[in-house]
Amino acid sequence: MCGRYTLTNVAPNLLGPLFGVLDIPLLSPRFNVSPTQDVPIVRVLSPGAPRSLELARWGLVPSWAKDLSIGDRMINARVETAAEKPAYRSSFKSKRCLVVTDGFYEWKKLGTGKKQPCRIHMPDEKPFAFAGLWARWKNAEGSALDTFTILTAEARAAVADVHDRMPVILAPDAYGSWLDPDEQRPDFLQAMVQARIGDDLVVTPVSTRVNNPRNEGPENVRPLFAQDLS
């Protein structure tokens, strides 16, 4: 699963070329993104439209949901079943997005019974994209809210030593097809997420500050050395 992540490098001249977006809003670095918060996703709202980077609430709320709180339990969707489950089926078909990130947290069980938080990131520390699904929900007054979930799959390589699941990380050359609302072939989409990347991810132990979702700041991602783990 993925219950916390980061986006520490938000420079427009970096994010724009990486994700093919021309207009990047002013963003603040995030060192402890948590469910129900508004964070950036990239999507294509209609066939032929340009990609846009906008804020959406983490925790997908299906359009038919009666209450916003359902999103609190829908921060992740298993890629194996997302195309069939009623909560995600419509979004998997035509409302797919990129979740902009540069690392995520998982907690490794130690022999002492404690858990060591680890930040998992690319070797070059550059931003990348989780495969996401989005939905638009309206409350009783008709106000719209856009929400999203992160697809997860079996863990790859070094991540498997920390957790048995991990977010689906899309290869950059898959962004176009993943975002295209007209691309609705189930087999093609499943093949795309199965071809996910992440074998070279780096697992870095970090401070227990990240255990508290209220804790932000660069201290969260500072690597711990061996003496810090004792």
Image: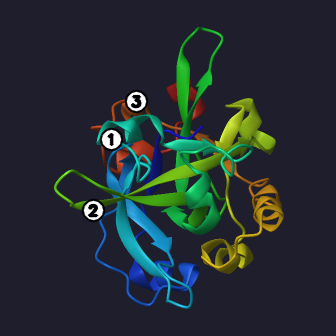
In this picture the colour scheme is rainbow
Determine whether 45 is above or below 230 in the image.
Answer: below
Q: Nearer the viewer, mark 2 or mark 1?
A: 1
Label 2 – label 3 distance at C-alpha = 31 Å
- Is the C-beta separation of discs 3 and 1 under 8 Å? no
Q: Nearer the viewer, mark 3 or mark 1?
A: 1
Which residue is the site of mark 2? 144
Which three-letter amino acid code belongs to the residue tagged 3?
A: Asn
Determine whether 137 is above or below 53 in the image.
Answer: above
Decide: few, some or many residues near mark 1? Use Cα within 10 Å; few <14, some 14-19, many ≥20: few
Which residue is the site of mark 3? 211
User: Of 30 and 226, which appears nearest the observer?
Assistant: 30
Where disc 3 sits, the SS reads: helix
Residue occupying image coordinates x 55% and y 51%? 150
Residue 2, how many percent across, how many down?
Answer: 55, 41
| Residue 66, numbered circle | 1
Label 2 – label 1 distance at C-alpha = 13 Å
Determine whether 169 is above or below 182 in the image.
Answer: above
Residue 125 visible in this rendered orientation of the protein: no
Which three-letter amino acid code belongs to the residue tagged 2?
A: Ala
User: Of 194 and 184, which appears nearest the observer?
Assistant: 184
Residue occupying image coordinates x 58% and y 45%? 86
Res 1 quadrant in image: top right
Decide: few, some or many residues near mark 2? Use Cα within 10 Å; few <14, some 14-19, many ≥20: few
